[in-house]
Image: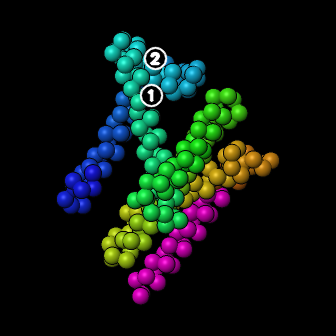
């Protein structure tokens, strides 16, 4: 896609448009779920998200809906998984400076990466691993990655003498969110007795962490401007 974009302005249209479209799709699914299950019933649907997607498609569109559900629950996640594994492989290759032009090196890196995915998938199927916990880890790391990118983008704006608050404010907010979740979640520090879902501790820790990160950023920004 990068070869087709002629300017940064086109990139704004493509990527912002994708985010807006994704938000609209999410609202449509939320509306359909609330309509069929009620406000409280959707969260208690047996079988999880895949079952609710199948039921909504079947009840609203019949046979055509079932086909769309199969595409949405099976085909789309497969392509998303392929992208995720490829991204993981390229990230590892970048970290360790591995040349991906050589197919043998690509294969040598693909096998362990896909092997980890296979172990997780089989473990969930056999009941040894709770995939919902893995999903929560993924959600947290995704938000933390967004926080890091926002801080990096803020420093980039500082160095280019542009309005950095447009990214620094959401970066501060995401810092509080990530730190709060890490402190109270049962799969993170919440494993410690007394911290599980303890908002009385997690909220202050999140706020303090965000303030500390903001102060570090402002200090670094001041040095960058002075230099």
How far from the left and from the top, in percent, is residue 122?
A: 63, 33
Q: Give the range drawn in magenta.
A: 204-227
Work out how far the residue at label 2 is from the one at label 1, CA to CA, in angstroms: 15 Å
Q: In this view, does 28 lie above or below 193?
A: above
At mark 1, the secondary structure is: helix
Q: Is the magenta stretch mostly helix, strand or loop?
A: helix
Give how far across and how far down residue 146 sits, in percent.
47, 56
- 78 or 72: nearer the eye? 78
Above or below, 200 against 158 in this view is: above
Q: Are marks 2 and 1 in contact (CB under 8 Å)?
A: no
Q: Residue at x 31, y 39 (%)?
A: 21
Q: Mark 2 points at which residue?
A: 55
Q: In this view, does 206 lie to the left or right of 158?
A: right
Which numbered circle lies on residue 36? none
The reply to whether residue 88 is in sight is no
Q: Residue at x 45, y 67 (%)?
A: 152
Q: Residue at 40% of width from left, 33% of height from top?
A: 76
User: Along the polypeptide, which appears first: circle 2 or circle 1?
Assistant: 2
For label 2, the SS is helix
Instruction: Check the image and name the residue furthest to the bottom.
Output: 227
Answer whether residue 51 is visible to the viewer in this image: yes
Residue annotated with mark 1:
74
Q: Is residue 159 covered in magenta?
A: no
Residue lying furthest right in this view? 193
């Amino acid at each position: 896609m990068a070869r087709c974009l002629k300017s940064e302005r086109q990139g704004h249209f493509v990527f912002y448009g994708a985010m807006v479209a994704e938000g609209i799709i999410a609202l449509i699914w939320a509306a359909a779920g609330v309509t069929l299950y009620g406000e409280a019933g959707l969260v208690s649907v047996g079988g999880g998200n895949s079952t609710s997607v199948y039921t909504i498609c079947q009840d609203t569109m019949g046979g055509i809906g079932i086909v769309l559900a199969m595409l949405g629950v099976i085909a789309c996640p497969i392509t998303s998984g392929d992208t995720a594994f490829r991204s993981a492989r390229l990230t590892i290759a970048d970290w360790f400076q591995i040349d991906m032009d050589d197919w043998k090196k690509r294969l040598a890196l693909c096998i362990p990466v896909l092997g980890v995915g296979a172990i997780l998938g089989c473990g969930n199927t056999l009941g040894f691993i709770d995939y919902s916990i893995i999903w929560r880890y993924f959600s947290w790391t995704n938000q933390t990655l967004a926080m890091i990118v926002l801080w990096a983008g803020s420093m980039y704006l500082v160095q280019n003498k542009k309005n950095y608050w447009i990214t620094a404010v959401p970066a501060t907010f995401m810092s509080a969110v990530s730190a709060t979740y890490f402190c109270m979640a049962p799969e993170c520090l919440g494993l410690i007795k007394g911290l599980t879902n303890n908002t009385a501790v997690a909220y202050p820790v999140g706020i303090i962490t965000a303030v500390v990160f903001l102060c570090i950023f402002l200090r670094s920004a001041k040095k960058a401007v002075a230099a």
